[in-house]
Every structure is written in C-alpha cells, then in structure tokens.
Amino acid sequence: MSMPSPQFLEPKSHDPAHLGTDPVPAGPYYREDYFALEREAIFKRSWLQVGHVCELPEPGTFVVRTIEAAGASILITRGRDGVIRAFHNVCTHRGTQLVAETGGKQSSFTCRYHAWTFGSDGALRGAPDLERFYIEAKDCGLIKIAIDQCAGLLFVNLDREPKQSLRAFLGPLAAELEMLPVAKATTFSEYVYEIDANWKLTYDNFQENYHLQFIHPRSGKAAGGPENPFGYPTRYGFHGPHRTQTIWTNPKPAIMPIQGFAFGKGLPFIAADGFAQAPHNRTYFALFPNFFLIGTPTQHFSHSVIPICASKSRGVIRLYWIGDDRIASQRFAREYAMATALDIHSEDRAVIEAGQRGLSSGALSHIHFQSQEVLCRHFFHSVDSAVQAYKAERAGSART
C-alpha cells in the first residue's frame, strides 16, 4: 500500500528535498580520523545534555559526568547559594581527578593527592603549605565549564567561550520543550548501556520507523496499522541542526493484555500530572548532537548516545516522572514502562552492532536513506557540516 507524503512543519524552503537524495559516504560511521574531527568540531564545542535539575535538589548535591569524546570529566554542583555550576573534575594543583564518586552530597571536595580542598562554588578553600607556592588561593579555583538549563534539562559546553547561548542554540524548540512534563520532573528511571557501534549509527536507529515491523515484531505491533504499516511519522521538522517529528497515533493499536493492564493502572496518574494534556505530547525532539526526548504520555523518555570511540558508544535512557510513587499501582505502571523500553531496546542492539561490523569492514563506500529516513539524512548533514566548518577553520588558521 502506498503511503501519503507527510506534512512538514517548516515552510517550503525547509522541505527535506534540500538535503538531496544521493547516498551518503560510509566512512564517517567507522573511520578513526573522522571521529577525531567530530571530537574537536562537535563534542568540544556544542551544548551537550548531561542531566536534570532534579538530580541536584538542594545545596551540596553534586553529580559527575564523563564525556569520553571530549576527554572530559565534569563536576556539576549546587552551591550554598542554590546556583548550579559545572567544573572540570581536575584539581588545579597537579591535574589529579578530584572526585571519584558519580554523585552525592558534600560541601567540599578534597584532592586525595595533596589535600587541596575546594568548595561547591569551585573556590580553593585551603591547601597545605600554600605559602610556599607562587600563586594566591583566589587564582586556583576549579576550571569553570559553561552550564545552562532548559525544561529542567542541564546542558554544558566545553568551549571556553561558547559561540552562542543555550537558548540561541535551541532556538524556538526551547519554548516547546518547556511545555513538556520533563520541565516539572522530580525523579526518573534510568538505564545505561554500552554498544559496539558508532554513535551516529546507534542514534539513527532511534529516529526512523522503517525497521519497526522487522526488528520489533512483538513490541512494535502497536506502531503500525493497515493505513500506515511502518508507523511513519505524520510530520517532520528541521530547525538548524535539530530535528522533530510527530509520532503517528494508531487508532487501533495491537495492545497485549498486560500492556492494557499496566497503562490502565498508570493513566489516572498521567492525567493528574498533565502528561496527556501537555502540548507536543506526540513530538520527538532530536537535539544536536546526541540527545532526543519523546513527549509521549506513557513513556516520557530521553536518550543520550555518548561516543566512546569511533566504534563504541554509551547510551543513557531515562523515563521522567513527576512525584514519587503514590501507590503500588503507580509503581507498577512506571516499572512496566521502563521494562517495555528495555525490551524494545534489547531487540535493537544486536542488529545495530551487526551494522557496525558490516560498515567497519569497508565493504560499502556509501549507504542509502529512503524518503522516510530523512531525519537520518539531516543528522548526517548536520554532523558533516560541523566537521567541514572545523576543517576550513583549521586550514585558515594554518595559513595565517
């Protein structure tokens, strides 16, 4: 059955035709030299989503995030003044990594090497025998990292002088994100995984529906129907390097009894929390470079794909909730939602890794995207545009 063309969110000048229809080169999905350029052009310069404000509920709380692609460990704190700050997790004496824990609550951080102690505001509070150094304590604070938030989501930028603010980077999507329940979330369920696949190849799997009926014959039954067998989105949008799609709603989904039971248990709480009535509750937000958030009421989840090397990535999947579990039925519904996400993802992982092995063999010089894989094509162009701009900048600097 032929499918009607989707309607597009953006004016005609943003029609996906401007992205072209040619195959794209396969090398960027496995070559080490290309990944090295991505590290410099993207992960050391872009706003990267690293957490949520609910992880730092009160002064003294902190989390540590590792971004291998940038060679960075980041300490994020909430100070006594309530301000959230980010620093390189590096003692300013001899560069020793300062904090080994992944999170917790404490008012200061002491380096195990020579006992330099820093406050949650990053200031050096004390150092043994400091008078023998040739510098003052006020000049030895932790190295700051730009941090900002939107809809409760925390973003950092490792560029010492970011070229644009977070709001400018997100553009109109910032206001749409703030309408989602994630902006009011107080807790979340989390699943972290590692996968032997390039970060782009991994990410692409989650922004196209072409594979659903083949890889998810059980869990994906609700995604398609006779009038839309692949469950293709109804609209796409392109917003600079970011992308959106509107998830198609199947009027007659094939729901298993346990699904109906679980969602039935949770729906009253979803309605009470405003999930179902929230604007954009069927929108998929893909934020450059490696984060996406889906506003669906029953699974309000986010996914970050963090590159480790050219052919290995780490994913962080979160389902956000408002308030603690009130009764057993709500706990059951939330646990089932997370279990469902895990089940679906487990069906994806083997085929993504098989794709990486095939591409890394060098057998293909190019790969092909069909019209409904337009988000994958836009993603490739966004990444490559950043890489080519960095190469041109570097070439220009070499000539001067």
Image (cartoon, grey):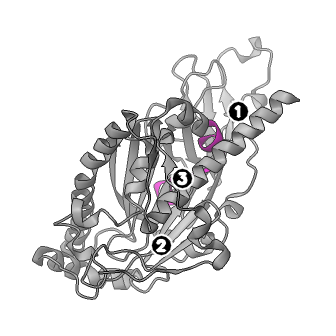
* Residue 303 found in image quarter: bottom left
Mark 3–mark 1 contact, CB under 8 Å? no
CA distance for labels 2 and 3: 17 Å
- Residue under label 3: 380
Crowd tier of the residue under label 2, counting other residues whose Cα lies within 10 Å: few below 14, some 14–19, many 20 or above = many
Q: Amino acid at mark 1?
A: Gly
Question: Residue 166: x and y, percent?
Answer: 67, 59
- Residue under label 1: 141
The residue positioned 34% from the left and 80% from the top of the image is: 2
The nearer-to-camera label among 1 and 2 is 2
Q: Amino acid at mark 2?
A: Gln
Give the magenta part as a residue range. 40-55
**Which residue occupies the extreme right position in the image?**
400
Residue 79 or 247: which is nearer the viewer? 247
First along the sequence among labels 3 and 1: 1
Whether residue 61 sits left or right of residue 239 in the image: it is left
First along the sequence among labels 2 and 3: 2
Dot 3: element:
helix
* Residue 247 found in image quarter: bottom left
Of the numbered discs in the image, which one, if any, rests on residue 245? 2
Whether residue 127 sits left or right of residue 372 in the image: it is right
